[in-house]
Amino acid sequence: MKKALRIMMVLFSVALISQCMGVTTFAQMRGRALKRAGKEMRGANFKEAERLYLQLLEQDQADKDARLGLSFALIKQGRLQDSYEQAAQVLSADPLSARAHSLLGTSLLRSGEFRNSIESLYTALKLNDSEALALAGLSDIEYFENRPRRAYEGLKRAVTLDPYEPDYYVSLARASSRLEYYTEAAEAYQKFLDVSPKTDAERRARIKGLIDFYHYLGSTKIHRPGGKEISTVPFDIVNNRPFIDVKVNGKGPLRFVIDTGASLSVISVKTAQKLGIKSVAKGGNARAIGGTGTFPILYGLLDSMMIGETKIESVPVYIRTVHSTDDAPEAERADGYIGLSMLGSFAMTLDYKAKAMTLDRSEIRDDAAAAAKPDASKSGGKKEAEASPVPRVLADYEIPIRSTSGGLASAETNLPGLDHPLNFIIDTGATISVISKSAVKRNSLEGMKLTGETFRVIGAAGIEEGAEALGLSTLTVSGLRKMNSRALILDLEAVNETSGFEQHGILGGDYLSNFKIVLDLRRYQFKLTPQNPAISVATEKKS
């Protein structure tokens, strides 16, 4: 009997040890798999990391770390809806997961869903004030809503909390550049090159070019305005685009397009050669619409540009080919484009009816500046990183706008049949409005396509034939509705690569030329005054 009991105890011990060894072995295997997936993430092998996380979830659907890792890997691949769903699944089981709230908010933010993203990101920070992803996301919102100082401060902390996340350094470099801290911007981009894997050679070449350009600028104060405080010049309208005469380095007149869809101003290669303007830095190729999809990046610095009686000194430019068709009349050919970064030194008025542009550099009064900025002293003790949703349109048709990471202005735009707004770049240099291929597919808008019609597109990267278009019964911005519009269907991946949050389209001259436009980036104000009976005011439903 005692012998039998001893045998049973030995067998029980062996079974218990085997079970414990099995649990230990699984835990060790899981730990190794998570570690390997993390290594793949750091090496930018996001697809392989996704595969490893999915393998872990096949073994245990409740593996929170694997699901959070999967969500982050999907964000890195731009699969924002899939990332959102994985983070939401974690939150259904663990509503207090700061990381899950961060991932949810980041996927919403990059999709352009600001209102919901703010709540998720702020919740993450309340749960864990060291959650770097949430802090970086809220700092990006500060940047998008024209609070670069607060963005800069938040991103400085984010890179301290997580010094090995490359994306934070890119955001910090952009905020530094907006504040004209060019040396700091160059240092942040260099840090990006140091910590990021050497996988995307083209992007690294572009960033090296930016570093060289920022080092060249150093402490230079760019876009220094002079001459008359208020100057008005006439413009011609050709294919819904405003052309004006300017002088560059005292020579001209030259024909430039007023182009709010360009961040940096542009001078054509041909004109630069004629004026003896040399590149001061170069690096890689920029992605753009049209033709081959890219153009070589050459940076230049103009001594001056004269627009009427206004003089702007130290004007950074791209030097690139300005495309036109071989049979284009002289009136349609441009020597360059005046970009938003230069116009940002003024309150600019484009009066399409009068065909006149006014540049006003009058000093902003303290009361006007205060009205344009949020009062941090009235925040009720909330964290400074908190941001508010974009307000409704004001009675005088002041349109809420945000800045993209690339420095362009974006406004919420409504299309027929959709219960949510889309983000459209404000682009006076575009003849016609545009909607992205991805937005057409995601919102099931294929039924609005114009049948039997295709269009030629002339973009920064060349000429593209055969573009399709949507026929829109209405195109509406903050209640200002234009009937019977159309929008070309184009691939905007190149635009979204540097936008920070998804841009679904471009608001072109076919819409904008029906208004008097006031754009004052010093206050971050955008106003539209209808000048055409084709524009009506839509009545919003009371909520």
Image: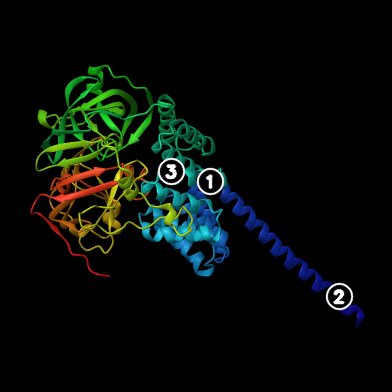
Q: Of the residues tagged 2 and 3, which is closer to the observer? A: 3
CB contact under 8 Å: marks 2 and 1 = no
* Residue 109 in view, yes or no: yes
In the rendered image, which residue does mark 2 sit on? 7
Instruction: Answer with the quarter of the image where residue 445 lies.
Output: bottom left
Residue sitting at 53 percent across and 47 percent down?
A: 41
Q: Describe residue 337's horizontal placement relative to residue 186 as left or right.
A: left
Badge 1 amino acid: Arg
- In this orientation, which residue lies closer to the viewer: 386 or 271? 386
Q: Is residue 423 above or below residue 171?
A: below
In the rendered image, which residue does mark 1 sit on? 157
Residue 389, label in figure: none
Structural distance between the alpha carbons of marks 2 and 1:
63 Å
Residue sitting at 49 percent across and 69 percent down?
A: 92
In the rendered image, which residue does mark 3 sit on? 149
Instruction: Please identify the quadrant where the C terminus is shown.
Output: bottom left
Q: Describe residue 482's horizontal placement relative to residue 202 as left or right.
A: left
Q: Of the residues tagged 2 and 1, which is closer to the observer? A: 1
Q: Position of residue 181 (x, y in %)?
A: 44, 34
Badge 3 amino acid: Arg
Crowd rating for badge 3 (residues with CA inside 10 Å; few <14, some 14–19, many 20+): some
Q: Position of residue 540 (x, y in %)?
A: 21, 65
State the SS at label 3.
helix
State the SS at label 1.
helix
Structural distance between the alpha carbons of marks 2 and 3:
75 Å
State the SS at label 2.
helix
Q: Position of residue 140 (x, y in %)?
A: 42, 48
Q: Position of residue 508 (x, y in %)?
A: 19, 45
Q: Earlier in the sequence, mark 2 or mark 1?
A: 2
- In this orientation, which residue lies closer to the viewer: 356 or 460? 356
